[in-house]
Image: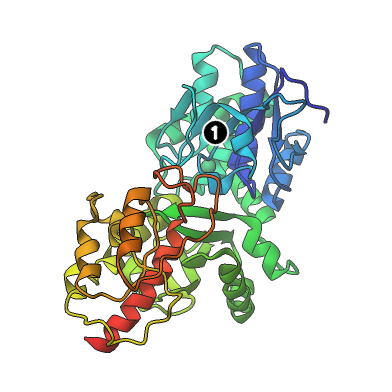
Amino acid sequence: MAYDINTVYVSGHRNPDTDTVAASVSAAYLKKATGLSAVPVLQGPVNKETAFVLEKFGVPVPEIVPDVLPVDGVKRKVILVDHQEYGQTFETIGEAEIVEIIDHHKIGDITTSAPIWFTNKPLGSTCTILYGMFRENNVEIPKQIAGLLISGLLSDTLLFKSPTTTETDKKVAAELCQILGFTEKDMEDYAMEMFKAGSSFVGVSIEDIFHTDFKEIGIADIKTGIAQVLTLDTEDILSRQDQFLDYMKKFRAEKGYFLTMLVVTDIIREGSYILFDAEDDRIVSLAVNKPAEQAVFVDGLVSRKKQVVPWFTEAYGKLWSSVRPSDWRSIRRGSVDWKDSVPLLFFYRTAGCLQNDRKQSGCLPAILSGFPACAVMAGCSLKNLNMMKQVQGFSVTLPEKRGPDAGRSCGFHSCPDFMTAAVSYLYLSKCLTQIL
Ligand SMILES: [Mn+2]
């Protein structure tokens, strides 16, 4: 599609799901009705469930747009729906102008240089928010759009079984049913038909299943990769457990994640099996309160947004706090066979998820008292860096800039991401366990 400078792209997240696609198409329709030249776009192919929905309501599949680089030196305009994290959007988003965000996730890391329209509501779907926007703008909802909105709503709330469901979602669904001429039973039948269309993975490759609904999420600043599949047939997936684990191990190493998970959600049993690969397995047991075994079933776990993310946020905090700076002082230089290349752990940043103390006081005394580490300079100023360099015998490694926002929150441009700190932390904690 040739890009016209007046065009505004409306895009959902990578690995589009039904809510993201339904919201993009509906938001573009609404914007058009209010006089904007808006076009829905995709960041990747639609999944089986979404393909079923688009076909059912006779809506063409939006075009896939791989990047949003400027055209003839002019920045492209983008409205983001159903996401607000760099890890879930165009890699080139920094080159575009975000003009609006409509979402129902936790506040993410995307920042803008000018004020924008921003609508974030803790509702069950982005489609629910959009319904309200149609009403506010007095734009009539045609059947096609009503069909998309109810599909996104039912898909994200798992037919109201997800804990993300609110009374507003139920009310909006009832109103959409009126437009569609659906009874409650029609709606339930339609939801099951839609889940069924999307949930059979027989004959689908491990990689494709894993990436059907995969998201990279910054949990407590730590890059974590979480895939979720909803299925009426968990057995098919679990019978391929070893293949999934092999794949996840490779994938995690490639991406440098601390943790990668596949959450296999059984819609009927209303719970999920968890497959994972982690730098430290304790993170899983701390989060779900069960032994860190593969394919452990967690009753009631159905929502990545409202359960997985907050549970793991807390678990990361617990894991990090198991080593305190005061412990470091008891370690004498020379007692561990340190590798030159081990990056120095800059503790205040590593522990940033626990304490907002941005002073280096927790770190420098530890180093000066003979702690033989070297630091990852995350969130560190150049002045502090030079201070570190003066500490005799410590090598300071500056990993390369990674990710669109690396260095954004600190004075030092080559600021590494949190992952490196986490890795050094683990190395450190291993050594500590050996000594103490
Ligand atoms: Mn959503």
Whole-percent x, y for residue 126 in the image:
52, 35
Mark 1 CB lies closer than 8 A to ligand 1: yes
**Number of numbered tags placed on the structure image:** 1
Q: What residue do we see at 46% from left, 67% from top?
A: 258
Residue 427 in which image quadrant: bottom left
**In the image, 81: left or right of 328?**
right
**Residue 80 lies in quadrant:** top right
Question: What colouring does the structure picture have?
Answer: rainbow
Secondary structure found at label 1: helix
Name the side, left or right, on which 333 lies relative to 124. left
Query: Quarter of the image containing the C terminus?
Result: bottom left
Residue 415 vertical position relative to residue 237 in the rendered view, above or below: above
Q: Residue 102: image x %, image y %?
A: 51, 30
Asked if residue 150 can be seen in this view, the reply is yes
Left or right, residue 291 beside residue 250: left
Residue 192 or residue 421, whichever sits in front:
421
Judge by depth and name the residue closer to the eye, 105 or 95: 95
Residue type at mark 1: give it.
Cys
Q: Residue at x 30, y 57 (%)?
A: 387
Q: Is residue 174 visible?
A: no
Give the residue at x 55% y 50%.
403
Along the line of sight, the residue nearer the viewer: 274 or 15: 15
List x then y, in percent, for residue 191.
Answer: 59, 46
Near mark 1 (Cα within 10 A), the count class, few <14, some 14-19 or many ≥20, is many
Residue that carries the numbered disc 1 in the rendered image: 127
Q: Quadrant of the N terminus?
A: top right
Q: Is residue 9 above or below residue 201?
A: above
